[in-house]
Image (cartoon, coloured by chain):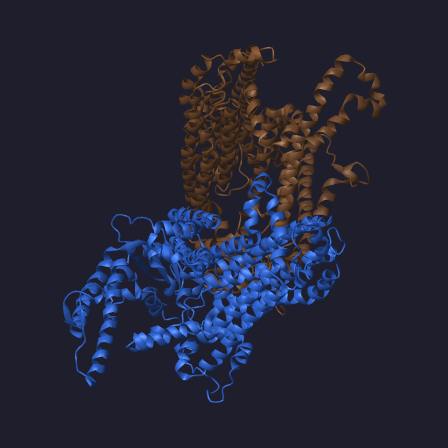
Chain colours: A brown, B blue
Amino acid sequence: MDFSSFVTSLGTSFVIFLVLMILFAWVSARPGNAVVYYPNRILRGLDPWEGGSTTRNPFAWIREAASSTERDVITMSGVDTAVYFVFLSTALGILVLCGLILLPLLLPISATDHGLKFHSNSTTSNGTFSDLDKLSIGNIMDKSSRLWAFLIGVYFVSFVTYYLLWKAYNHASDLRANALMSPEVKPEQFAVLVRDIPPVPEGQTRKEQVDTYFKTIYPDTFYRSMLVTDNKEVNKIWGELENYKKKLARAEVVYALSKEKTGDRPTNRTGWLGLIGKKVDSIEYYNEKISELTKKLESEQKVTLREKQQSAALIFFTSRVSAAYASQSLHAQMVDKWTVIEAPEPRQLIWSNLKIKYFARETRQYIVYVIVGLTILFYMIPIAAISAFTTLKNLKKLLPFLKSVLSIKALTTVLEAYLPQLALIIFLALLPKLLLFLSKVEGIPSQSHIVRAASGKYFYFTVLNVFIGVTVGGTLFASLKTIENDPKKVVDLLATSLPGNATFFLTFVALKFFVGYGLELSRIVPLVIFHLKRKYLCKTEDEIKAAWAPGDLGFATRVPGDMLIFTIVLCYSVIAPLILPFGALYFCLGWLILRNQALKVYVPSFESYGKMWPHLFIRVLAAMILYQVTMFGYFGVKKFYYAPILIPLPIITLIYGFICHKKFYRAFHVTALEVVSRELKETPNMEQIFRSFIPPSLISEKLNDDDNFEDALSQVSRQGSFV
Amino acid sequence: MDFSSFVTSLGTSFVIFLVLMILFAWVSARPGNAVVYYPNRILRGLDPWEGGSTTRNPFAWIREAASSTERDVITMSGVDTAVYFVFLSTALGILVLCGLILLPLLLPISATDHGLKFHSNSTTSNGTFSDLDKLSIGNIMDKSSRLWAFLIGVYFVSFVTYYLLWKAYNHASDLRANALMSPEVKPEQFAVLVRDIPPVPEGQTRKEQVDTYFKTIYPDTFYRSMLVTDNKEVNKIWGELENYKKKLARAEVVYALSKEKTGDRPTNRTGWLGLIGKKVDSIEYYNEKISELTKKLESEQKVTLREKQQSAALIFFTSRVSAAYASQSLHAQMVDKWTVIEAPEPRQLIWSNLKIKYFARETRQYIVYVIVGLTILFYMIPIAAISAFTTLKNLKKLLPFLKSVLSIKALTTVLEAYLPQLALIIFLALLPKLLLFLSKVEGIPSQSHIVRAASGKYFYFTVLNVFIGVTVGGTLFASLKTIENDPKKVVDLLATSLPGNATFFLTFVALKFFVGYGLELSRIVPLVIFHLKRKYLCKTEDEIKAAWAPGDLGFATRVPGDMLIFTIVLCYSVIAPLILPFGALYFCLGWLILRNQALKVYVPSFESYGKMWPHLFIRVLAAMILYQVTMFGYFGVKKFYYAPILIPLPIITLIYGFICHKKFYRAFHVTALEVVSRELKETPNMEQIFRSFIPPSLISEKLNDDDNFEDALSQVSRQGSFV
């Protein structure tokens, strides 16, 4: 890519960004769009425009985002989001600090050498180096002592990263501790999740078994237990019931509207999708269905609570310290019995996974790892298969009627160029869903854990396939033979390919932040969808509310995306330091725009108290090691005799990671007792805590009738143990 | 080694064994020797000869050992010894079961082939094969389909081991659980050990800091804390004091004896070793010293308790469940602060190690690992150095006056043969001490843990150096060049060297059990030492008691010794099945004789509730993997095309080990709550539990005066928290 096309690409991206910004400033100020641009504030019952909408400055959001505190973020979007911002600001800090030192130091050193001219004379390439390439390490002569500056640069970048990462880990740890020690009563802090309960002994019910077991161990603080049941059937009935309730509400609105005009009662057909079958009066029909299903639900609830008890349970304690130490202790002599872990929030508990047994979970996990590993390694194969199928020749053969269409020259060219990419895009779009599904299959009990697991898988996928794939690209296949003979060559190959791709990745990063964050902020797609839905589909208030539901930040894909950028920028930080300001701009814009989105748009769907941080940390270290090994290879390729000076770096990174893991990790895995031993604001209402864990499909209409819960959910002696 | 020399060696060993047995039967029946042969019973206040000494059958001990139950072993020698017997009987079971199937199956198959004859014609060796070698796999022709039987044998041995090991792990786990749930009050079950206490905050004492911290977290069950102090100085004074007390007692006995004769008061000199200096009256002098040191001790005790407080403490709880979950939970947000672990028994607590900080411990551990690794790899170097120095030529050069002596031909030969071995023996004798020292340096807080750590190091040392060293021996050095080019060759080399050494190891095993266990049972050395000491050195009762103090079973060297035999027998089980009965005999005799020693002789010096088992288990698996890999190599050397059928075996072993580790290990690492939630026989006397942890050097003469302990040992509110 030459200089002019680089500028063109950069300019285009910037123009798109500007257009999107202006669009945002314009549409976000219209009150009708508030639900698209301020849903988080609206759902929390806050005024969308805090300062008053009349004198609204279109760029006020920047000031608001920049001046918002960490406390605001935690209040509006939870600790997980705050931890994510710790990552963003750490990445920004690393890149800014490195840029400030490396740019004025390395650019002049590169620009004043003649490596490229020298090389272009001697090699077969026809010298397409540009001004940009002259600013990279590629312009340094082989064996030049100028390489010392770059070598020191590698050390500098590493130590800056260590330092800021250490501070960030401390900060994240504090965030988690503060959230856990909060005086607010949080139901999940009073409960633990027990799995792998052994078979019920003769003459006892499951309930008695569980209650006796925990009452013996925690005579003072055990409150009550809730048996986990198989809710598949009851969930299905409840889902149908809710659906009919919605339909009824809709029919009533339609009827109310038609009263003014024709007065026709709405009708529908009872068959498939409402298209075939007998025509009935909707309101009557739905009312009938609802009362029928309500009865069915009630009887199914009873059956579920009585007969579908699983080998798992939630145990409630009257103190959060008790729940914390219970979740960390071994209860049974055999580890695969009475496994106790912290209870996740009620909303993110995956009930269907709870019954999976200890060794089944372990086995599933390793099988999933193998599948993901194979997917990462061989993801080219399905794409190649799709591409092969979708080449024009094959299409012509398989679908002869397309022949005449495909004879048009222009169309053919376009199709030929885009079909494989289309296949790739579809596959990449499906990947997060696949990874989330695979993570769920592992038997993980909480949604946040699934998201973390999927995000990890996706990170390794993108780094290996996008970054290394693009860099090494075609060269790899051509030289596969060489690699087989000597695996050390992989690093060399990567190192040689790096400088050539510097401009490509510069453009990539710029595209990502201009267009990606432009779309993110302007929310064009959700806006259009919302207006279309509201106009043509939605009738009731609930339907409209569902149409603007903003969703959460989507860490499963967002984090690996940022990580990919960080990895790329890190790896190029010394080779082509010009990438540093671009990377810094990415994280700066990202911080600003996501701050806005976190405060005003997205509604978190779970809270894991920052458990995501160690995963982010490990991935930054993985990127570091990739960077350090690549640089070692690169200096080797440059025939720099002192390249081995870089060998200690990956080892230092490993030791650094090990120390951090030892020092900080356990507090992220479990809850430290000193943290939860802080006093609460009020005496916890245990009944309310207990009820918050009952899934909606099991909540009876007659809430006060405790008989329904006696079987699976009741307590041993409410009078005695309730303190 | 040919057949006749094998029989000679076996015969000699057997004769030695018989002589030792007869000696034992004779001397152990004499009442004066009871303290050597029944010290454990005597120390527990039991009658040495339970059935009455008059009608004593010299072989009664066999009946007694064989009929003793596991309960007897636990009562007399603790759970650790019982777990050791689980290992011995499992090894015995494996070898007997394998022998019963493999011997009648494989011996005829070997004996009827002609591999050795064939080989001896074609190779340069002059055909020194014997009848013994004909019974090994060496006599099978290359590529013969008879090898199938041996291959199936490898699988059979492996699966027998898996099965019996699984049962043994279950059994060991039960033993531990039963011991931990015992209704007896054991002080260590009510305490936890806290290390890495952060610096004392302004305006608080260390004691207040610790008490407040734990009282907040465990308001109901916290009893009291005991600060760990630097006892170096006080221990020294106390040791001197005790020494003078002993000397005084001795002087008084001497005086009492001399009264009858001369009436001289005993005297001694005050200088170095009592050989120089002023001559004084012993009784007066010692009394003076004692009263002087008692005062010094008291003031030093005060100073220690007040000013030498360390960043560690023992915390006492009023319930053992509390202590159990406290020891398993993370207390501080940073893992390197307030580290809590189970308290070991008071007698095995290593006070001087408690103050070592978290990361210092980690670092020390890895440094020790590196040192041990290097020792294992390069232990030949110091020996070679000693040998080189001690060769005759060098001796002559360095010590010219020896020249005339060394000219004698016969002497030269003997010296030349034995000097290097002597060096090896001295080095090997020093090794366990070195390993125990290194393990202590790691910062481990309990004696039992140090023994386990040293035992592990010693195992890998013996297996790598004795077994592999002897087997591969000189060949390795000769072919070091080949190995450098292709590391796979190591296995091949080991495989080729194995059959040739079968007879050597057969003799080795036989020697070990005949002579080793003969000496063990007859206790000739302790007997002689005891009688010599009693006659020439001991004056007081205490001195005599010290002279027959039996010590403990010495797991640090005993376990690796047994493991080495097990590894050898396992590795030869299919190659030369004749080793199986020898191995079985080793473990059978071992079981019998050690049962006798455990019940009657050795006094355990600690109780770790079977924590040794997982270490034994891991080492059996290590032996298994060595066996399986070697066999794979051996079948390759035999050019057997189906050798790859053995590849799954090491993988199965790893998975098996992983599953066992997951299922059982944590219950050995910590205490399961359900186990300690059993009821106690009596309400624990917390004051007594607390006092049992005070080191003897800190126990004040005025035991009722609590003021001495107020500083470091007192409680916050004894009235309030004592339930």
Residue farthest to the right, as pictured: A400
Q: Is residue A630 above or below residue B682?
A: above
Q: Is residue B656 above or below residue B177?
A: above
Looking at the image, residue A375 sits to the left or right of residue B444; the answer is right
Q: Is residue A119 above or below residue A71?
A: above
- The image quadrant that residue B563 belongs to is bottom right
Q: Position of residue A399 (x, y in %)?
A: 83, 24
Question: Considering depth in this image, is B272 or B584 the residue closer to the camera?
Answer: B272
**What residue appears at the point 40 percent right and 78 percent down from the top-left corner?**
B35
Q: Position of residue A385 (x, y in %)?
A: 74, 30
**What residue appears at the point 63 percent right and 69 percent down from the top-left corner?**
A202
Looking at the image, residue B678 sits to the left or right of residue B126; the answer is left
Q: Position of residue B654 (x, y in %)?
A: 60, 52
Res A614 seen here: yes
Image quadrant occupied by the N terminus of chain A? top right
Numbered circles on residues, count: 0
